[in-house]
Image (cartoon, rainbow, N blue to C red):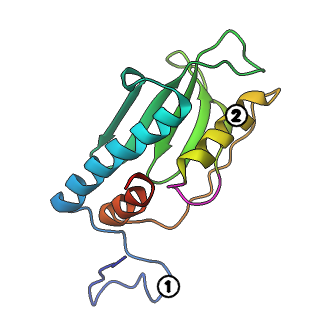
Amino acid sequence: MTTTTSPSDDRSALGRRAAPEKTSEGTHLLTSALDRYVRQVAGVLGVPVEGVSFEVTDTATAYIALGDRAAAFPGRDVMLVWSATQGWAVSIETEPGEPLIALGRLSGDVVQAPERVVSFVAESLARCEAQPSPVVRPPSMGWSDLAECMDHYTS
């Protein structure tokens, strides 16, 4: 991954990295890779393509509608979401204005093997209560780097 700093940029002196660049080429690469990666995860979960969506704008996110129910919330729909900054999380589908009900957040890299994501979903659905889900942010990655990580699991 490459980061750029200008001579007047003191972030490196403070031990912080510059924000990764999001070029149009990187956006195109990530859009294609995210499409393949999310479909791969959904396929392993048995979720049809109609239950999958994603977008790459100033951020990158994905959504997979899960057909399973959580032990703690048997009457509620469950979703698996991914973001470029936080990775995978399992949550209860909520109404507008209702606070987030998180069942779990997958720790570690934001891009993980589809089989690991499936195990994480099963663990999250088996929980007997919602969990506070502190966000531990992994290092920022540029769009091209994220695409390369995803391609590792879909090639």
Look at the numbered disc 1 and give the secondary structure of its residue.
loop
Instruction: Tell me the amino acid under the disc marked 1.
Output: Leu
Name above or below for residue 92 compared with residue 89. above
Instruction: Tell me the amino acid under the disc marked 2.
Output: Ala
Name the residue carrying label 2: 122
Depth check, front residue: 54 or 14: 54
Depth check, front residue: 10 or 137: 137
- Which quadrant of the figure has residue 105? top right
**From this viewpoint, which residue is outermost toward the right?**
128
Q: Quadrant of the C terminus?
A: bottom left
Q: Are marks 1 and 2 in contact (CB under 8 Å)?
A: no
Q: Position of residue 124 (x, y in %)?
A: 71, 34
- Which quadrant of the figure has residue 53? top left
Q: Position of residue 71 (x, y in %)?
A: 77, 20
Name the residue carrying label 1: 14
Q: Residues within 10 Å of mark 1 (few under 14, many from 20)?
A: few
Q: Residue at x 27, y 90 (%)?
A: 7
**Which stretch did the figure color magenta?**
107-112
Q: Position of residue 84 (x, y in %)?
A: 43, 52
Q: Residue at x 34, y 65 (%)?
A: 142
Q: Residue at x 37, y 26 (%)?
A: 49
